[in-house]
Structures are given as C-alpha cells and as structure tokens.
C-alpha cells in the first residue's frame, strides 16, 4: 500500500466517519483527512450534504412536534398520507 493511499480514507470509511462527525468532534487529523477526501470525491461530498439535510429536516420536524404537535406536510395529499400510514402499520404487524 502506498503512503498516499494510507492517508486517504476509502468511501466506506467516509460513510461511517461523516455520521460520527455529526455526533461528536473528531480529532483534527481525522477531520483533515475527511476534508481531503471530500475535495476529491464528489459522491462523498453529496452524501455529506444529504446527511446534513436529513439532520436539519429531522431537527426542524422534532422542534415542530414539541411546539405545535404533528407537522402537516403541504406536499402530500390526504390519500398519500393514508397510504403511507397503512404501509407503516402493515410493517409493524
């Protein structure tokens, strides 16, 4: 294994590390290696943006649940919501 390849995380490592970085502060040398990988890998950069978006949406939804009760999605019809509810209920059984 070359010295350079040891310095760069694999995409599989990145998936775990990006998630870990949202829960805790990683050591500086790990954060730098993540940054280098993200500069070279558009797929991992996209994955990081998706994780960030998902976290932000879930936080906003949780805040709304605390403040107002269940959030109402203006994007889904009543029929679509009911289909989703039935599907979730069938998977719980």
Image (tube, rainbow, N blue to C red):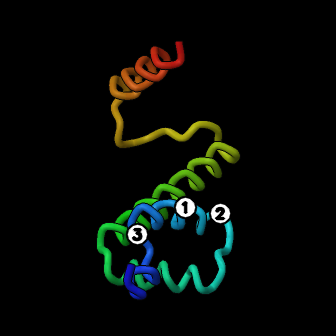
What is the x, y in percent for residue 3?
A: 42, 87
Q: Earlier in the sequence, mark 3 or mark 2?
A: 3
Task: Indicate the quadrant where residue 41 lies.
Answer: bottom left
Q: Which residue is mark 3?
A: 10
**To which residue does mark 2 refer?**
23
Marks 1/2: CA distance?
A: 7 Å
Q: Which type of secondary structure does the marked residue at label 2 adopt?
A: helix
Secondary structure at badge 3 equals: loop
Residue at the (48%, 55%) spot, across then down: 54
Between disc 3 and disc 1, whose residue precedes? Answer: 3
Query: Residue at the spot x=34%, y=27% of the render?
Result: 80
SS class of the residue under badge 1?
helix
Q: Nearer the viewer, mark 3 or mark 2?
A: 3
Q: Is residue 31 left or right of residue 81?
A: right
Whole-percent x and y of residue 31? 56, 81
- Crowding around mark 3 (Cα neighbors within 10 Å: few <14, some 14 to 19, many 20+) is some
- Circle 1 is placed at which residue position? 19
- 62 vs 69: above or below: below
How far apart are labels 3 and 2 at the CA level? Answer: 20 Å
Please tell me how crowded label 2 is: few (under 14), some (14-19), or many (20+) other residues with Cα within 10 Å.
few
């Amino acid at each position: 294994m070359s010295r350079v390849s040891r310095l760069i995380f694999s995409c599989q490592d990145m998936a775990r590390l990006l998630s870990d970085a949202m829960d805790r502060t990683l050591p500086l040398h790990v954060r730098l290696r993540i940054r280098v990988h993200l500069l070279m890998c558009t797929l991992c950069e996209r994955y990081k943006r998706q994780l960030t978006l998902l976290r932000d949406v879930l936080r906003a939804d949780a805040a709304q649940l605390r403040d107002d009760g269940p959030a109402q999605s203006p994007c889904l019809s009543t029929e679509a919501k009911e289909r989703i509810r039935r599907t979730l209920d069938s998977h719980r059984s």
